[in-house]
Every structure is written in structure tokens, then in C-alpha cells.
Amino acid sequence: MNSDLDMPDAGISDASTADERAADAVWQDDVRAGVRHVRDLNSLPLSPAERAAAQQAAAHHKVRAPKPYLDLIDWNDPHDPIRAQVIPSPAELVATEGELDDPIGDHDFSPVPRLTHRHADRVLLFPTYQCAVYCRFCFRKESLTSIGRGYTREALEPALAYIAGHREIREVILTGGDPLSLPDKALGEIRAGVEAIPHVRLLRIHTRVPVALPSRVTAGLVKALQGRLMVTVVTHFNHAREITDATEGACRTLRQAGFVLLNQSVLLKGVNDTVEALEELCRELMYRLGVKPYYLHHGDLARGMAHRRTTIAEGQALVSALRQRLSGICNPTYVIDLPEGGGKVPLASCAIEGRDGETWRIRGQDGEVRAYKEVVGAR
Ligand SMILES: *Cc1c(COP(=O)(O)O)cnc(C)c1O
Ligand code: SF4
């Protein structure tokens, strides 16, 4: 453990060669030079209101952002979309009626520690509750506050035994926390533990590391994840300004390793809630990074986030406009993750306006409703 980095899970380099050690030194410097603790905000040009909010906000949800991510902020713009994601704001201290500690019901579907099993064929596995960056809007922030929930091999044993005992599980989704904030050795152990279970086919990794700490995507990290399983890395870009030469390099490394890359974004008021922002984000993800936009999440009911939530109707209007402007491959599915474990449900407005026997009335992409008569052969 290297407490100097205040990021115990990620503070360890276990590199075996000089090249690997040099690559690890780069990202460790990026962590060290960033904000690791609320007191580090003192060195940033915050507004008096942000400064006043910081201490109290940090008591609810940690403050952390690596240097390359902070460098994307235009400090002259009080509404900068990167700043809005990582700098505590006074608005997040306001809890609104109806907000929830466990917005999507992770805990109700947790048969053993560090695992959520809500859909038969896939589970969430939580190897760590730490992240390389703490997003103010995080839907799991209540889980991330507890200390002492870093990675140990023993902590995952009950979860791995559970997966081994359930043959219907084909996908294991590493989430948290951010799994890629773990050292290579831990990632290699987790990968080996999962791939030893013969019915598991795919390892999925949900991470903001390629966005916020792209230097962490090293050859050593790739090597730790390669093995028998198909690997899918689901990144979390929310704005085109997060797409840089460095994030492009990280995604190229992951693609060249043979991993499938997808992205999920959260629809956030004042960050990406315009057609132009979403259009540019989705297009650059696909065309520049080779990352397929997968989900656009409606803002969930995490506490203190009313100021970042749009209405569902606003989201529907945005995705209808996106459908006209972007190809199918560039379009994400707009979903809501329902409380109490209701799962992810598509929200795009329904194209079906009605039906009369075999004739359906369906709204086309141009907005016109057309009659479509079904023609099927006799059974
Ligand atoms: C989001 C989620 C998944 C993954 O769902 P996909 O639709 O396959 O991406 C699995 N389990 C839980 C509990 C989830 O919240
Ligand atoms: S990286 Fe993910 S889990 Fe971590 S704070 Fe951000 S949204 Fe939450």
C-alpha cells in the first residue's frame, strides 16, 4: 500500500520490467498531481460558493480527480461540463423528497457480499469501492463512502463461489467503484478467478479510467485482462470535451488488445442535455475512439442531484432528434434504471400510434404517421 497516493487500491505498482515500471510511474504522477482529497481543492480557482460547499459535500461523497482530467476544465467558465462533474457544488447539499440512497436497488438483489444478481445470465461483481475519479452525480455514492472496502482476494471468494454454483450466469460485470483503479496483479487474479468458472463466457468492465486517467491503460493492464474470456470494456464518457489524444490512445490500446468497447453516458442537465452536445459526443465516440454508444441513462434518484436531472420528456425529445441526426451505430439506447431492481427500461417515445386489425399506424423518422399493413403467410 502506498498511502502517499491516498488511493490504496491504485497506489501499487507491481510491474516486473523497467518498461512497465516507467508506464506505471506516468499514471501515478497523474494521480499524485491531481485532487486526491478535499483539501487539494484549495489550489484550484473555485468560486466562493464552491469553496464553501466543498468540505460538507466531501463528507457525503469523496472528492478526487486526476491531473489530466482537471486540465480539461476551462476555469473561466462557471458552467464548464468537466467542472460540473467533479467539483462539489452547493446544490448537491440539497436533498429532495423522493431521492434514494440505493437508487437502483443493488442491495435488494445481493445474495452474497460484493455481488448483485438481478438478471439470470449476468451478475455485478464489486472488487473495490474506490474510483480514480469521484463523479458528483454517482448513483452508487452511498456505497463508496465506507472505508476498508478495497480489494482482497478473500473478500471476493463468496461471490466467486456463488457464480460457480449458478450455471445460468454467462457474464460477469466488474463494477464498483472502478475496477481499473486496481493494480494489475489484482486484476489478473480476478480475471483468473472468473475464467476458472467454465460456464462464464464474458468479462465486462465498467470504468471511467480511460476517461479520467487514460495513462493507467498500460500494456501491463491489458495483459492482466487477457485470457480465455471475451472482454468488453464499457467506458463512461459524458461530453465530447473528454475525448482527447490521451483518451484516444487508451481506447486504441484496449481495441488492439481485442476488447469490445462500449460507452454509457448519464444525461446530465448543464453538462450534455442539448442535441448538439450529445450528437458530437456519440459521433466522436464511434468515429474517433471506436467506442459504440450503448446506453444513455436517465439521471437516477441519487441524493442531492435534482439540479442535474432532466425530465423524461426532455430526454425523449433529445433522443428523437439524435435518431434523425446520427446513424444507428452512433445511437445509444435511452434507458431508466428503475428503483427497487426494476432494471433498465427503454424510454424513447413509442413510434406506434395505434392499430386497426392488421394495420398499424407507425410514426416514421420524419415525424409522419404511416399505415403499415402486416402481411404474413398462413401457419
Ligand atoms: C445494468 C445492470 C446489468 C447489465 O445490464 P445490461 O442491460 O446487460 O447492460 C446487470 N445487472 C444489474 C444489476 C444491472 O444494474
Ligand atoms: S467512476 Fe463510476 S462508480 Fe466511481 S464515482 Fe464515477 S460514476 Fe460513481
Image (cartoon, rainbow, N blue to C red):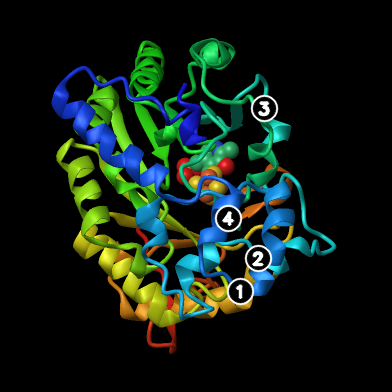
Identify which residue is drawn at 42% across, 30% down.
11
Compared across the picture, whether 245 is left or right of 107 comes to left
Taking the view exactly as shown, the residue that stands out farthest to the right is 97
Q: Residues within 10 Å of mark 2 (few under 14, many from 20)?
A: some
Classify mark 4 as within 8 Å of ligand 1 or not, answering yes or no. no
Identify which residue is drawn at 52% across, 78% down.
79
Nearest-to-viewer mark from 3 and 1 = 1
Q: How far apart are marks 4 and 2 (CA)?
A: 38 Å
Judged from the image, the secondary structure of the residue bearing numbered disc 1 is: loop
Q: Distance between the residues labelled 2 and 1?
A: 6 Å
Q: Please name the residue that numbered disc 1 is placed on.
A: 47
Nearest-to-viewer mark from 3 and 2 = 2
Q: Please name the residue that numbered disc 2 is placed on.
A: 51
Which of the two discs, 4 and 1, labels the residue nearer the N terminus? 1
Q: Residue 345 carries which label?
A: 4
Nearest-to-viewer mark from 3 and 4 = 3
Q: Which amino acid type corresponds to the residue marked 4 in the rendered image?
A: Val
Q: In this view, does 137 lie above or below 189?
A: below
Identify which residue is drawn at 24% across, 47% down.
250
* Mark 4 in CB contact with mark 2 (< 8 angstroms): no
Identify which residue is drawn at 57% across, 15% down.
155
Closer to the camera, 17 or 361?
17
Q: Please name the residue that numbered disc 3 is placed on.
A: 110
Compared across the picture, whether 94 is left or right of 118 comes to right
Q: In which quarter of the image is residue 56?
A: bottom right
